[in-house]
Image (cartoon, rainbow, N blue to C red):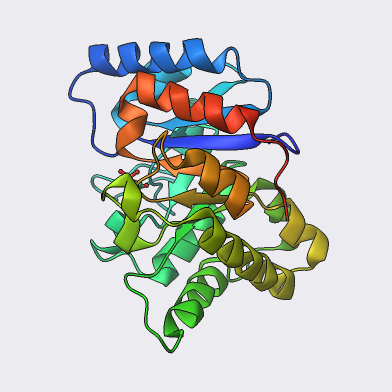
Amino acid sequence: MKKNKKIIVGNWKMNPETPEEARAIFGGIKRTAAGARNTETVICPPHIFLPLLSKNATPKVQVGAQNAFYEYVGAFTGEVSAHMLKTSGATHVIIGHSERRALGESDEIVNKKVIAALREDLNVILCVGEKARDSEGHYLEFIKQEIVRGLSKVQKRYTFNLLIAYEPVWAIGKSDRDAMSGADMHQMSIYLRKILAELYDAPAAARVPILYGGSVSPFNAEDIVSGGHVDGLLVGRQSLDAKSFGEILRIVDLVRDSKI
Ligand code: PGA
């Protein structure tokens, strides 16, 4: 990861339906990304499209996975190891997405996956975020625990390959007006860096990119990145539309360094 570059991650989830569509969307995104000066893009398709897309990846548009199993090889039906993802051309992997946590992935499993992926030299995008907010602020402790448990036994040297994606579950898959405001995200960015500083130290906290995810669109991208002081975005639905995603990319590319 290059220092001071913004990062836009596209999480395609279980889309699109065919390899032809995957190639077409990826091609469209690559055309816009070619003109980006300050932004790197990472597209995370379903595993099955990784070899196809990684062949066409560039330093500006890389590919990542949406999950990785923590064992290296063996009798684990249906799983794909971090090592296999790496050999399929993935440079990044999303770990602990709320949709996987909803299927039963615990912080302990997330932690094992984080460690396995970092050992494979993959850049890990660790997703955290509360389901709902409460007036007493318990959700802040919940987020902290997701980070502390997710990074248990992860040594400081690995923070060079770590990204944190803050994705409040209540903002995922909604209208772009339901996303966090830049001002609210600014508070959260400060809080997340404080947790990282406590866990490691201030330089580590400063170098881990913080991304926001949850109903990002061209409508809210600038406010979130500029006002929220984040290093990038994790984009779901809009990353399947090369035109909208390209717009988000262009908007973010124009935001001046907004780091806290
Ligand atoms: P969304 O998804 O942009 O469609 O809300 C974000 C995510 O789940 O990563």
Q: Residue at x 68, y 53 (%)?
A: 208
For the image, the number of numbered tags is 0
Task: Tell me: 30 left or right of 97.
Answer: right
Quadrant for the C terminus, please.
bottom right
- Which residue is outermost to the left? 17
Foreground pick, 104 / 99: 99
Q: Residue at x 61, y 19 (%)?
A: 36
- Image vertical order of residue 137 relative to residue 108, above or below: below
The answer to which image quadrant residue 201 occupies is bottom right
Q: Is residue 175 visible?
A: yes
Q: Is residue 63 visible?
A: no
Task: Tell me: 84 left or right of 47.
Answer: right
The answer to which image quadrant residue 151 occupies is bottom right
List x then y, in percent, for residue 15. 24, 31
Task: Tell me: 23 left or right of 31.
Answer: left
List x then y, in percent, for residue 170. 30, 63
Quadrant for the N terminus, please.
top right
Foreground pick, 171 / 148: 171
- Which residue is outermost to the bottom? 136
- Image vertical order of residue 222 relative to residue 144, above or below: above
The answer to which image quadrant residue 241 occupies is top left
Q: Residue at x 52, y 38 (%)?
A: 92
- Image vertical order of residue 239 relative to residue 28, above or below: below
Q: Residue at x 58, y 71 (%)?
A: 152
List x then y, in percent, for residue 206. 75, 56
List x then y, in percent, for residue 233. 50, 43
Foreground pick, 259 / 74: 259
